[in-house]
Image (cartoon, helix red, strand yellow):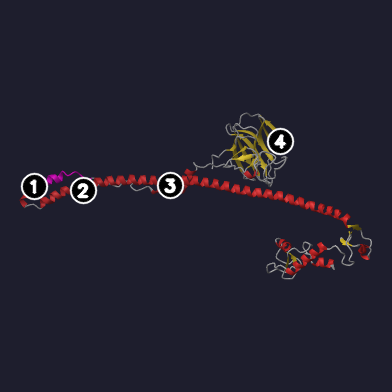
């Protein structure tokens, strides 16, 4: 009876006594947590009959009460229900408590029977053994969760930093555009003032001419109103005055009288952008901070890298942890690409490329091609086939040219245009190749801006 009751009170998902039992439309019962967990992975159907559930999960209060009564009775049970004797023995075959009469009954013939006080420590030890992997898993999950919490914090820091930098850049551009707008409006107003002054000067001259002519005309018209004898007497003087009237030159507008709108408005966006080029720089390679070793710090514009004390940053799959290395943000699988690195005064550095699948957490056995300056000597290395010392001194810059189509990577001295070395076996297959930088310096190893963009 007890066994049947226990089976009736067991969830078919977790096979344990119901915890907060719910009832579905089809009248099947499950633990609330069990069925909700299953529905996160599957549609809202009954795990037994697959009927679709159309309502929320109501609690089955009667079943909950039955489970609580059963658990309470099981915890308090010390007497055999059949023989009314104390339960002093444990049947290992049926995994249940029995009395002395049960031991000799037909039901337990041939079974392994042990006293409770002997078997309980053994069971406890077995349970501890079974619990240990679960506890270890919880500990590992807790560590992993803490790692995720730190990653969330780092993401927020990244967002705040990027937001600040974006704001600063746009503020700089706004200031440039405002100044550019002011300069262009001032130039427009200056041309307006110049053209207006020229026209006003000409109009003032015309006003003086008109005034002088008007005075002569008024004098002559006044003479016309005089008596006949007076007109005749003054005629000679009047004609002489009119004859010697200074010639009047008719002013012309001439070329360029109006504002040169084409100069101010033509290709306005392009001209503003062209002037803006003096404000900005283009870097052919941008460093990816998510790949940087914890003891490397990048500049705010992500174009230089230097050594610092170890930082608390998430250890993500793409991060280098065995070498003080960082890679570029963009990878290449076709075309021709070039960039320059300023290396003057630096010791123990390397520039080159790495493949997308290069080992980031251990020894690099393959997928790395680079020029190194270590312990005062220049060399080129690619695992596992190339190691060669170079007879060079005092490089200030290194120019790298990656031709993915020809599978070559060459190193050049931009000051002398000399090719220092060329790898001819840089094979990316289906992978991308990324610019790579290694440094153990506290002074920055810097990507130089391109002069052509």
Judge from the rendering whether residue 417 lies leftward or rightward of residue 388; answer left or right: left
Q: Quadrant of residue 291?
A: top right
> Which quadrant would residue 93 be assigned to in this image?
bottom right
Q: Please name the residue that numbered disc 4 is placed on.
A: 386
Q: Report the side of 425 relative to 90 (left or right).
A: left
Q: CA distance from mark 2 to mark 3?
A: 43 Å
Residue 242 magenta-drawn? yes
Q: Which of the two marks, 2 or 1, is nearer to us in this view?
A: 2
108, 422: nearer the viewer: 108
- Residue 155 in percent (x, y) is at 62, 49
Among the two numbered marks 4 and 1 on one chain, the one whose residue lies closer to the N terminus: 1
Q: Which residue is denoted by mark 3 in the rendering? A: 181
Query: Disc 3 to disc 4, how far (Cα)?
Result: 57 Å
| Of marks 4 and 1, the one in the foreground | 4
Badge 1 density bin: few <14, some 14–19, many ≥20, Cα 10 Å: some
**Image spot of residue 209 (x, y percent):** 21, 46
Q: Nearer the viewer, mark 1 or mark 3?
A: 3
State how far apart marks 2 and 1 are (Cα). Answer: 24 Å
Residue that appears at 76% across and 51% down: 135
Secondary element at image label 3 = helix
Closer to the chain start, of discs 2 and 1, is: 2
- Which residue matches tag 2? 210
Q: Residues within 10 Å of mark 2 (few under 14, many from 20)?
A: few
Which segment did they paint magenta? 236-248
Q: Residues within 10 Å of mark 4 (few under 14, many from 20)?
A: few
Q: Main secondary structure of the magenta part?
A: helix
Q: Position of residue 98 (x, y in %)?
A: 89, 62
Between the residue at mark 2 and the residue at mark 4, the CA separation in whole angstroms equals 95 Å
Q: Is residue 2 visible?
A: yes
The quadrant of the image that shows the N terminus is bottom right
* Residue pointed to by mark 1: 234
């Amino acid at each position: 009876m007890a066994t049947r009751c226990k089976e009736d009170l067991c969830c078919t998902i977790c096979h344990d006594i119901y915890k907060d039992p719910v009832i579905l439309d089809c009248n099947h019962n499950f633990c609330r947590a069990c069925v909700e967990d299953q529905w996160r992975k599957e549609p809202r159907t009954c795990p037994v009959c697959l009927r679709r559930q159309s309502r929320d999960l109501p609690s089955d209060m009667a079943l909950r009460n039955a489970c609580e009564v059963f658990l309470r009775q099981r915890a308090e049970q010390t007497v055999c229900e059949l023989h009314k004797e104390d339960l002093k023995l444990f049947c290992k075959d049926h995994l249940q408590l029995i009395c002395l009469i049960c031991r000799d009954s037909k039901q337990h013939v041939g079974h392994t029977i042990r006293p409770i006080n002997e078997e309980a420590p053994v069971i406890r030890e077995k349970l501890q053994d079974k619990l240990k992997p679960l506890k270890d898993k919880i500990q590992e999950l807790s560590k992993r969760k803490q790692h995720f919490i730190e990653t969330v914090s780092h993401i927020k820091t990244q967002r705040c930093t990027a937001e600040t930098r974006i704001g600063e850049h746009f503020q700089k551009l706004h200031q440039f555009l405002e100044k550019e707008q002011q300069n262009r409006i001032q130039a427009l107003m200056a041309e307006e003032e110049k053209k207006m002054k020229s026209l006003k000067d000409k109009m003032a001259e015309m006003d003086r001419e008109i005034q002088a002519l008007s005075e002569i005309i008024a004098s002559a018209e006044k003479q016309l109103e005089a008596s006949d004898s007076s007109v005749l007497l003054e005629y000679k003087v009047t004609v002489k005055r009119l004859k010697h009237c200074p010639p009047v030159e008719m002013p012309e507008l001439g070329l360029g009288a109006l504002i040169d709108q084409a100069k101010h408005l033509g290709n306005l966006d392009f001209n503003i952008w062209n002037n803006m080029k003096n404000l900005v720089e283009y870097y052919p390679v941008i460093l990816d901070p998510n790949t940087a070793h914890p003891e490397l710090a990048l500049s705010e514009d992500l174009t230089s890298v230097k050594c610092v004390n170890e930082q608390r940053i998430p250890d993500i799959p793409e991060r280098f942890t065995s070498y003080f290395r960082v890679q570029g943000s963009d990878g290449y699988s076709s075309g021709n690409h070039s960039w320059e690195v300023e290396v003057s005064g630096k010791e123990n550095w390397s520039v080159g490329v790495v493949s997308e699948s290069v080992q980031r957490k251990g020894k690099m056995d393959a997928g790395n091609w680079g020029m190194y300056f270590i312990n005062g000597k220049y060399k080129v290395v690619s695992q596992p086939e190339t190691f060669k010392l170079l007879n060079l001194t005092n490089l200030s810059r290194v120019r790298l040219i990656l031709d993915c189509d020809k599978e070559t990577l060459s190193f050049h001295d931009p000051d002398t245009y000399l090719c220092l070395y060329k790898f001819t076996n840089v094979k990316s297959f289906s992978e991308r190749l990324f610019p790579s930088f290694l440094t153990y310096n506290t002074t920055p190893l810097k990507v130089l801006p391109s002069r052509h963009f």
